[in-house]
Image: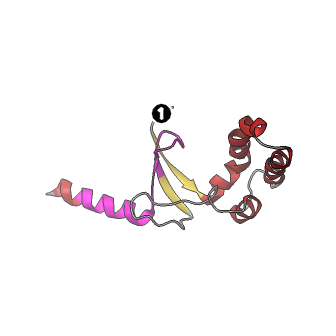
Amino acid sequence: MSNSIRPVTRRMRAAAAAKQWTLQYRPLLANYDKDRRAQIIGVGAKLADLGPSPDPDAVDAIIGNTSWTSISCSVCGCDSLEHAIEMGTDGEDGDVRICEACLAEGLAKLGKAVAA
């Protein structure tokens, strides 16, 4: 994988939720009892039923929390973003997400430093 700079939105994260859910939980199914396996498979099916462009709030409702669609700024900590810039290795742990306000502040500081 390569380092990159890319936009990320709640809608993009919601669109990836069904596939990511399956990738995360399918290898672990053997570790769960029958009822938990059925619950995990059911959540995956409900996510898939939302189609390719699901509403992030619908994904949150099915999963029961906002962790699969939320976006937080790595700089200021704001955790209710609709979109941000993501930098790193294509969605890997350790990627950095920066909101518009922090990105603008950083660019302004860089401009002043370069001009000095």
Q: Position of residue 107 (x, y in %)?
A: 32, 58
Residue lying at the far front of the rendered structure: 33
Q: Is 93 inside the magenta-drawn segment?
A: yes
Image quarter in which the C terminus is found: bottom left
Q: Position of residue 5 (x, y in %)?
A: 46, 45
- 35 or 63, which lies in front? 35
Residue located 50% across and 60% down the image: 72
Q: Is 91 inside the magenta-drawn segment?
A: yes
Q: Count up the numbered dots.
A: 1
Residue lying at the far top of the rendered structure: 1
- 53 or 31, which lies in front? 31
Which colour scheme appears in the figure?
secondary structure
Q: Quick one: label 1, few (<14), some, or many (20+) residues within 10 Å?
A: few
Residue located 17% across and 57% down the image: 115
| Residue pointed to by mark 1 | 2
Q: Say what amino acid the circle numbered 1 marks.
A: Ser
- 98 or 30, which lies in front? 30
Q: Position of residue 88 (x, y in %)?
A: 45, 42
Query: Label 1's element?
Result: loop
Is 91 on the left or on the right of 34, as rendered? left
Is 48 on the left or on the right of 110, as rendered? right
Residue located 46% across and 60% down the image: 73
Q: Which residues are magenta?
A: 86-111
Is 8 on the left or on the right of 46, as rendered? left
Vertical order, 50 against 29 (above or below): below
Q: Position of residue 91 (x, y in %)?
A: 54, 43
